[in-house]
Amino acid sequence: MADTTNHTEQRECRTIHAGGEWLTAASGATREILDPADGRPFAVVAEGDEKDADLAVAAARAAFDEGDWPRTPAVERAGLLRRVADLLIRDRERLGLLESRDAGKTLEEGRVDIDCVADAFRYFAGLVAAEAPGRVVDAGSADVHSVVVHEPIGVCALITPWNYPLLQASWKIAPALAAGDTFVVKPSEITPLTTIALIDLLAEAGLPAGVANIVTGPGHTVGARLAEHPDVDLVSFTGGLVSGVKVAQAAAPTVKKVALELGGKNPNVVFADACATPEGFDTAVDQALNAAFIHSGQVCSAGSRLIVEESVRDRFVDELARRAGKIRLGRGTETGVECGPLVSGQQRAKTEEYVASALAEGAVLRSGGRRPDPAPERPETGYFYEPTVLDHCHREMRVVREEVFGPVLTVETFRTEDEAVALANDTEYGLAGGVWTSDAGRARRVAGRLRHGTVWINDFHPYLPQAEWGGFGKSGVGRELGPAGLAEYRESKHVYQNLAPQPVRWFAG
């Protein structure tokens, strides 16, 4: 088995990094990190607060205002990002295992996450290295040279979630570094370990001291301070709607740039023609399971709302429920396990409450809906919950309207294309959605009418580093990935140079 030694234990809780040094919390406070597969602590980190956040911001500010990184040529910044990607692949097994233990996901999911993190660093390296030095603006005169250039925005506060700790951090850190910014990252207090490890890799790749800083600690102290700090120029937050609103409110008095990637309640629309062949039916069912239950449903883009055409509903849901009941639950590092635990006891209790409310409101339980029986690969103390299919759901149910962030799939039914679109758009969120049909015209029509930031046709969950990721409605503002993701971490400056200046004679004198 791969080495599970945690760097945080070796540092004696020095998991706050500011100005190139690893530090304990100013208060001396610590936090135990629990393995969700058994509920037991396996690491200890510093529990930072506002003082630690201030120290890290000061380091990032000094590195931006006085250091070389913002003025480092783009090709050199790109080279560092590529070195980081190589280091990530070198440490893939160790980091994948750490992600599995920290977040509860399977080891294979952890490994794939590390591959995607490396892809993000390589993508932004290639994007910034290939850019032109500026966009020429025609001023209508040969005596004027006018150009729009992009400059780093400054000090970035990056607040990341617990479900994809290192992947979500990379979506912010890679473009920030590519742009020439400095940053302070605050990972989730319950899954900080791989982000801590990334800071080490950045230093190993040659990033100057003070450019990358991290504060481990809770959102209500560290995150709140970063969002309001006057020396922070941008705050990027990924997480829940309630916390996102607080971040935006805290950032408003200093009018800093804000990027928010918030929740989702994502429809997966299945038309009958997608199930007309045995292969089509099996693929649509398989992808519905993937959409809803990968990482135990703890995915902002999870296809947690199955919206299926009435003529195939019974057959589709019967098979879906049968296969959901066969999903193998257990510790993510165990061979053959397909789904790990929820990240915490609190998250499992929240999931249980949603299922109970759905049943009270008339939903029909088709599979799951309970804690599984203990097994050698599934300790009783772990935070496991069976993949759950709730049939005969409707829009008035809380479980249909609100983001559960657990292994719960609701089933709604439609008869017409217009009804399918209306149901899919009947949400305050607008992050992602899927459409399953063999009719190419219908696929384009429905995808065009869905008010969601990403629409998959005959697929679910893939993302491309080159494509912007964001949502409509209460799913947030701003974009990650793609050219727009890099633009979030920059300011545009218009440089107008008159090569033959003349007096304007506006005033007598």
Image (cartoon, rainbow, N blue to C red):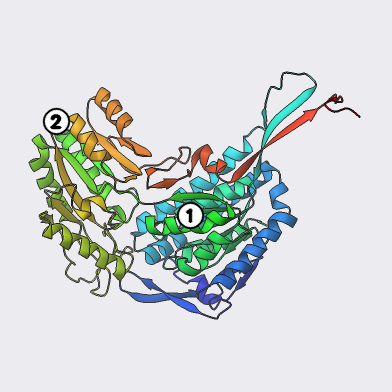
Sequence-wise, which precedes: disc 2 or disc 1?
1
The residue under the point 21% across, 59% down is 328
What's the amino acid at mark 2?
Answer: Ala
In the image, residue 485 sits, relative to residue 262, either above or below, namely above
Query: 497 and 204: which one is in front?
Result: 497
Observer-side mark, 2 or 1, equals: 1
> Residue 296, position in %: x, y?
28, 57
Few, some or many C-alpha atoms within 10 Å of disc 1 (few <14, some 14-19, many ≥20)?
A: many
Q: CA distance from mark 2 to mark 1?
A: 47 Å
Left/right placement of residue 170 relative to residue 350 reads: right
The residue under the point 25% across, 39% down is 424
The residue under the point 85% across, 28% down is 507
> Residue 86, position in %: x, y?
55, 51
Left/right placement of residue 248 relative to residue 371 reads: right
The residue lying furthest to the front in this view is 508
Query: 274 and 306: which one is in front?
Result: 306
The residue lying furthest to the right in this view is 509
Any mark on residue 318, and which? none
Q: Is residue 91 shown to the viewer in this render?
A: no
For numbered disc 1, what is the local secondary structure? Answer: helix
In the image, residue 334 sits, relative to residue 152, either above or below, namely below
Q: Is residue 39 shown to the viewer in this render?
A: yes
Residue at the spot of label 1: 248
Few, some or many C-alpha atoms within 10 Å of disc 2 (few <14, some 14-19, many ≥20)?
A: few
Q: Quadrant of the N terminus?
A: bottom left
Residue at the spot of label 2: 276
What's the amino acid at mark 1?
Answer: Ala
Residue 372 quadrant:
bottom left
Residue 276 quadrant:
top left
